[in-house]
Amino acid sequence: MNKIHNKIKLLNQKSSLEFLPNLSNKLGPKIYIKRDDEGGRGGGGNKLRKYERIIADALNKKADTLIIAGHFQSNASRALVGAACQLGLKSVVVCKTMIPEQNPTFNENGNALLMKLMNANIITIKQEDDFQTEMERIADNLSKEGKSPYIIPFGGSNLLGSLGYLDCANEIIEQFKDLEGKSPDYIVTSAGSGGTMAGLVAGFALARTETKVLGFSVLHKDKTIEGIVTHLTNEIVNNIKPNSNIKPNFQLDTNLVGDAYGIPTEKGKRAIKMFAELEGLFLCPVYTSKAMAGLVEYIKENKIKKNETVVFIYTGGMPLVHAYYNLYE
Ligand SMILES: *Cc1c(COP(=O)(O)O)cnc(C)c1O
């Protein structure tokens, strides 16, 4: 079987698609939320969909140890350790600071705490060390010991990982048909390493819907992220339906990043409060709050109309709420 179809099960069922009555009432358009924070091990979140094919590939290659790199508050690392626990695999997390410490417990609270509880093997590298080089060095050493290591791509955003969000697009199309009888006008998501957005863009385009995927960058402030998403989208489309004349429908906005990745913004902080007060759901300062701030802005500027429908992809990241506990002090 083609390896793009080879996947393991890290999530039990489809994630819920819920209507947000209070937010819709306040902002105008009908807004739904795709609960990709639900289910799975290690605290869940969008990375698990990506790992369903990435870890399948690792297992296919007889890997016994998964290696990932990131900062101390990485959702990607935390979810990977959880999946590895479930599957009885070993994991190595290569860590260094990427976000300036936001408070005295920043590198111990939130995701760092959860990784510690799962007894993660965390290797802290020097600030000037390169993640990829260090992961390869660790992999070489493991191979010499007779182990079989596998390096997880950055953010899980390669072809195999991004396909997890093609699955998500198909779920939404099916669920939305029951709810509204058609496909949504907009999908709103944050874009970090870009795989989540690319999978969604490819999924809605391949299904020949009119749905536009609107992504708010949280990392790159320039055209880099558009290049990444375009490349990954094309790669997915070419693998699923080669030589098809499919036109991806997406827009990437880099104006909501703020100062830098992981640095909260005023608009994001307002979005977190609004969402918690209205809907009892928690956005994180790093990803989802910046996407929600973007959605609010687009509605205010009438770029998204009151009679249109929106699905907001809730990618998880709850532990970050705790890591940034002093955000409102
Ligand atoms: C990683 C992450 C994202 C971004 O996903 P990408 O595929 O890297 O763009 C968004 N939200 C949360 C909570 C994440 O952990």
Image (cartoon, grey):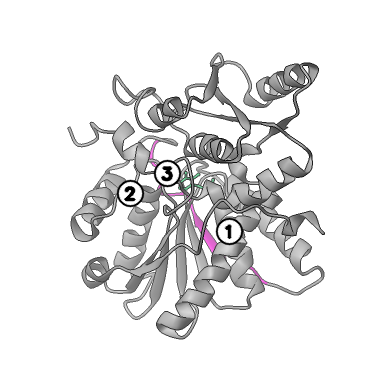
For the point 73% across and 45% down, the residue is 57
Count of numbered marks: 3
148 w.r.t. 126: above or below: below
Residue 223 in sight in this render: no
Does mark 1's beta carbon lie closer than 8 Å to ligand 1?
yes
Q: Secondary structure at mark 1?
A: helix
- Mark 3 packing: few (<14 Cα in 10 Å), some, or many (20+)? many
For the point 56% across and 26% down, the residue is 93
Relative image position of residue 320 (x, y in whole percent): 36, 37
Q: Amino acid at mark 2?
A: Leu
Q: CA distance from mark 3 to mark 2?
A: 15 Å
Along the viewing direction, whichever of 262 and 267 lies nearer the viewer? 262
146 w.r.t. 110: above or below: above
Question: What predominant SS class does the magenta segment belong to?
Answer: loop
Q: Are marks 2 and 1 in contact (CB under 8 Å)?
A: no
User: Which one is earlier in the sequence, the residue at label 3 or at label 2?
Assistant: 3
Relative image position of residue 272 (x, y in whole percent): 27, 49
Magenta stretch in the rendered image: 247-259
Q: Give the quarter of the image for residue 243.
A: bottom right
For the point 46% across and 44% down, the residue is 218
The residue tagged 3 is 257
The residue tagged 2 is 283
* Rendered image: mark on residue 228: none
Asked if residue 258 lies in the magenta stretch, the reply is: yes
The residue tagged 1 is 165
For the point 52% across and 65% down, the residue is 213
84 w.r.t. 71: above or below: below
